[in-house]
């Protein structure tokens, strides 16, 4: 009797079994990521990457590749933070990638806008920049919804305080592990523009 769709005996079983190692590895990675999050990350960044404290970044929804790169930079000292260098010290590249995938799969609610006039300023700067000071739009790199790319961070839904802190670090050249263009961008932002755009970004889902 012919086999369905021309399949040969045992081929379906072989194909099914061939996917098992990848599935098992994925499960192990996920389990290891959850263990690391519970032991190290959750105190500051939350169990789901929601980061209740405004001084720590929300990692939920962040690109997996970007998270892994930042962890590697912390471990090597390329990005400065004694706390994060200690936390990343024992992580393997595979664990960093697993943590990235874990956080990318999570989501957090965007901030409800309150000061609509301030949000309007932030929206303008984010989308248009400031032609008078030569400030480029944030959207030109991070996208119209601030979702970023695997190489550029997702900003949408991030704590405003954290955004402002990072802009200050870029401006002072205290953060040098990412795109150098951010040094110029941060230097051109006024205090009002930085505050407004950070508040606006926080409202994006």
Image (spheres, rainbow, N blue to C red):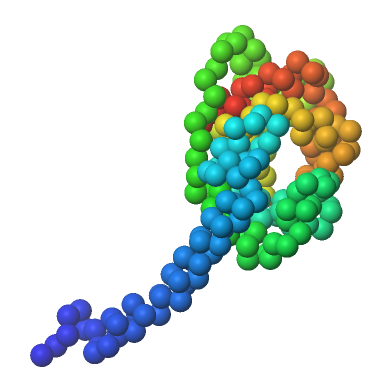
Compared with 16, 92 (above or below) is above
Compared with 149, 30 (above or below) is below
In the image, what residue occupies the spot 77% across and 26% down? Answer: 135
Percent across and percent down for residue 1 are 10, 90
Report which quarter residue 169 is drawn in: top right
Percent across and percent down for residue 68 are 66, 55
Report which quarter residue 124 is drawn in: top right
Question: In the visual, does 80 lie left or right of 95?
Answer: right
Question: In the visual, does 151 lie left or right of 192?
Answer: left
Percent across and percent down for residue 192 are 75, 15
Compared with 85, 112 (above or below) is above
Question: Foreground: 55 or 118?
Answer: 55
In the image, what residue occupies the spot 58% across and 41% down? Answer: 46
Task: Evaluate whether residue 177 shows in this view.
Answer: no
In the image, what residue occupies the spot 29% across and 82% down? Answer: 13
Task: Evaluate whether residue 186 shows in this view.
Answer: yes
Question: Foreground: 186 or 28?
Answer: 28
């Amino acid at each position: 009797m012919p086999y369905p769709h021309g399949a040969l005996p045992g081929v379906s079983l072989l194909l099914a079994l061939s996917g098992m190692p990848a599935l098992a590895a994925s499960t192990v990675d996920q389990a290891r990521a959850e263990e690391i999050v519970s032991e190290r990350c959750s105190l500051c960044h939350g169990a789901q990457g929601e980061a209740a404290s405004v001084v720590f970044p929300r990692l939920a929804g962040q690109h997996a590749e970007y998270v892994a790169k930042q962890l590697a930079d912390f471990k090597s000292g390329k990005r400065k933070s004694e706390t994060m260098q200690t936390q990343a010290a024992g992580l393997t590249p595979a664990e960093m990638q697993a943590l990235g995938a874990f956080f990318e799969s999570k989501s957090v609610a965007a901030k409800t806008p309150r000061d609509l006039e301030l949000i309007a300023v932030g929206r303008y700067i984010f989308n248009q920049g400031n032609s008078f000071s030569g400030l480029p739009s944030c959207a030109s790199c991070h996208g119209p919804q601030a979702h970023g790319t695997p190489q550029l961070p997702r900003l949408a839904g991030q704590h405003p305080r954290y955004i402002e802190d990072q802009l200050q670090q870029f401006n002072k050249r205290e953060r040098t592990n990412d795109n150098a263009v951010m040094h110029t961008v941060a230097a051109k932002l006024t205090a009002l523009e930085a505050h407004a755009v950070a508040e606006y970004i926080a409202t994006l889902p």
